[in-house]
Amino acid sequence: MITGSIVALVTPMHADGQVDWERLDQLVEFHIKQGTDAIVAVGTTGESATLSTEEHCAVMDRIIRVTAGRRPIIAGTGANSTSEAIELTQEAKNLGADACLLVTPYYNKPPQRGLIKHHEAIAAAVDIPQILYNVPGRTACDMLPETIAALADVEQIVGVKEATGDLDRARKVIELVGDRMAVYSGDDETAYQLILMGGKGNISVTANVAPALMHEMCMLALDGKADEAQALNDRLMQLHKAMFVEANPIPVKWAMKRMGLMDRGIRLPLVELDERYFPKVELALANLELI
């Protein structure tokens, strides 16, 4: 089982929007050195929506090869077309990913029975561990706890990323499926609390810029050290909030540029961070001695 701090890795790009392969290699090494427990390759934070299929597969391949088994790799292979999700998931398996992360189909708003059939079809087609990903604020599609429970006995479905930030919802999901699949937080601000409830880790945006601190916080929570985990999360809260002053991954990519980790590239329709937010993000980085 994959546990701990799992970075939803950005895809570094040059100023013209082309993938920066050298920086990508460096980011993988940075996370291994800093203690990140696992890497999500080309999740939604990795701008999966604007990478071509060829680029998507090439980035997955590069991360898997550079990591070389030193950390588990979870490939982002979700799509709002079931056939496309199957193709990406099969390619991730072929490349050697350890698991796949499948966001709920966005825009087309399937009913709950459609979500069940969608994930059953992917699981039947590709024999690789699969993690459901519920983030209704981005997809306009909410996978209900009862739907997650209905999928929990599918052999290939091993986890769920619950990114609503609703701890009551998280508690219900853990009560329903916690003995059958891993439940991960997808909300940095509340991640330690979900882990203390029985969650197995956090799939994180903040970990892109503060990987060592996020690893430490997750380990404290997994060890049941509630007060220490809360204290560290309190230190990180300003950064958590700064990472969402505009749509993800706009702030985190700007922060990483400010830290010297990558160039300023991001793909339309996303654009660089509005300069009015520069001081807020810089202050959050400075207060944690990240710049």
Image: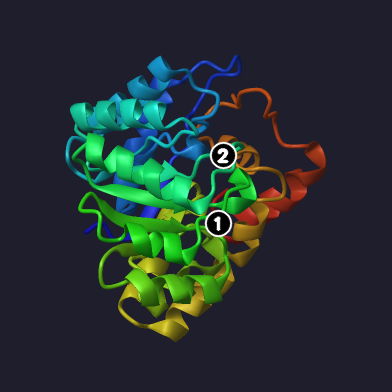
Q: Is residue 19 above or below residue 280?
A: above
Residue toward you, 242 or 89: 89
Question: Which residue is at the front of the view, 93 or 42?
Answer: 93
> Is residue 148 at all visible to an observer of this figure?
yes
Q: Nearer the viewer, mark 2 or mark 1?
A: 2
The quadrant of the image that shows the N terminus is bottom left
Disc 1 is placed on an element classified as loop
Q: Residue at x 54, y 44 (%)?
A: 110
- Looking at the picture, does residue 29 appear above or below residue 140? above
Q: Is residue 213 visible?
A: no
Residue 227: x and y, percent? 46, 85
x, y percent for residue 53? 42, 19
Which residue is the extreme one toward the right? 276
> Is 249 situated above or below 111?
above
Residue marked by disc 1: 289
Which residue is under mark 2? 106
Q: Amino acid at mark 2?
A: Tyr
Name the residue: 46% across, 45% down: 114
Amino acid type, residue under disc 1 in the picture: Glu
Indicate the position of residue 233 as horizontal and vertical percent values: 52, 71
What is the number of the mark on residue 62?
none
